[in-house]
Image (cartoon, helix red, strand yellow):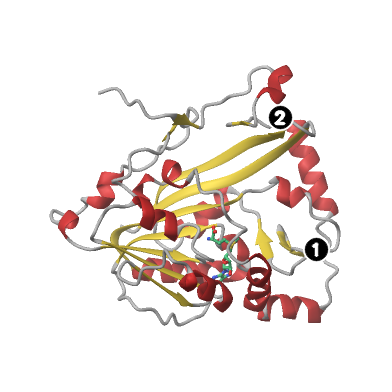
Amino acid sequence: MEDKRPQFGNRILENVDEVFKHNAWDNVQWNADQEKAAAEKVELNSTVTFSEDRLKDLEENANKHWDAFYDIHQNRFFKDRHWLFTEFPELAPDFNSAPVRVFPDGESKQSTPDRIKHNDEDAHNSKRYIFEIGCGVGNTIFPILQYSQDPNLFIYGCDFSSKAIEIMKQNELYDTKRCEVFVLDATSSDWQVPFAENSLDIIVLIFVLSAIDPTKMTNVIEHIYKYLRPGGLVVFRDYGRYDLAQLRFKKGRCISDNFYARGDNTMVYFFTQEEISNLFKNVGFVEEQNLIDRRLQVNRGKMLTMYRVWIQAKYRKP
Ligand SMILES: C[S@@+](CC[C@H](N)C(=O)[O-])C[C@H]1O[C@@H](n2cnc3c(N)ncnc32)[C@H](O)[C@@H]1O
């Protein structure tokens, strides 16, 4: 039967004169000059000038800096989740109103939600567990709870900011029969969690791995592997190399290659597709998707163009 749902990801800019006709364009190709200019810009801001003490503070008090962030922004900051079920239909397989993702030619396609839901013979009769790492104040968990009708779905979430967890628990949508969130530093060597090893169906990493020191990322992925069930899936979306946010950093904010401290002392890394691939595959995951989402956002009022770069990926535990 023909799929009548709206499509997403296929607004391609063919004539540059038309750039200000829409708010955003998909799958924007970068030419060699643009790539070179971005690399030069990054080179300019990549000298590390932080003192040892400042670097130590950024690392040791990372959770406190996020506490301060949530103290200021409460639950108003990370709002926009229109893409969640388009990019990751696995998160609410029974929610069929999200636009259908159209992929550029040659990109790997997304896995079939049904494979996750009905992976085992009786999977659809048993509980399904999702765990989000770095859940913040619930901008991913609450939409899933709202859209999923599945009575067998249970969602766990963790964040190392106790402030974020406190704000999330105060939300009227926080329903202890359907979810549980707790404080956990995902980089710790021993996770204290309310679920068993090999038990989770999906682990969600949305703009969280980028907040973690690159030298600690493998440890996080190893824990993820341990707690996913065989056949379980990781869904990942995060900043890509040369995203506008990276190019906007001024000199003096760099911590190590492609890793920066923002003005509020929260940290952010910018990935290549290959780095993500290696991180997961080296731990034993099988790659199901790894694509670069290059979007041109347009501010038509100010006649500004903004080149965004995100990496989106899915990895399965065999
Ligand atoms: C950019 S925010 C994204 C929040 C949420 N995933 C979203 O998309 O709305 C990054 C989140 O990761 C959390 N975080 C950073 N490092 C963490 C760590 N080591 N363990 C657990 N959470 C962490 C921060 O407190 C923050 O809530």
Q: Is residue 83 visible?
A: yes
Point 77% across, 48% down: residue: 247
- Tag 2 and tag 1, C-beta contact below 8 Å: no
Ligand 1, image quadrant it occupies: bottom right
Residue 118 lies left or right of residue 161; in this view the side is left
Counting from the top left corner in percent of width and height, residue 64 is at 66, 78
Considering the numbered disc 2 on the image, is that residue within a helix, a strand or a loop?
Answer: loop
Considering the numbered disc 1 on the image, is that residue within a helix, a strand or a loop?
Answer: loop
* Residue nearest the viewer, comparing 76 with 101: 76
**Residue beneath disc 1:** 253
**Above/below status of 4 relative to 118:** above
Q: Is residue 186 visible?
A: no
Q: Name the image quarter holding the C terminus.
A: bottom left
Which dot marks residue 13? none
Counting from the top left corner in percent of width and height, residue 1 is at 25, 23
**Above/below status of 2 relative to 129:** above
Residue 171 lies left or right of residue 130; in this view the side is right
Residue 35 lies left or right of residue 274; in this view the side is right
**Residue beneath disc 2:** 31
Can you tell me whether the CB of the residue at mark 2 lies under 8 Å from the nearest atom of ligand 1? no
Furthest residue toward front? 172
Q: Image quadrant of residue 269? A: bottom right
Point 86% across, 68% down: residue: 49
Question: Nearer the viewer's eye, disc 2 or disc 1?
Answer: 1
Type of the residue with mark 1: Arg
Mark 2 is surrounded, within 10 Å at the Cα level, by few (under 14), some (14 to 19) or many (20 or more) other residues, namely few
Type of the residue with mark 2: Asn
Counting from the top left corner in percent of width and height, residue 241 is at 66, 48
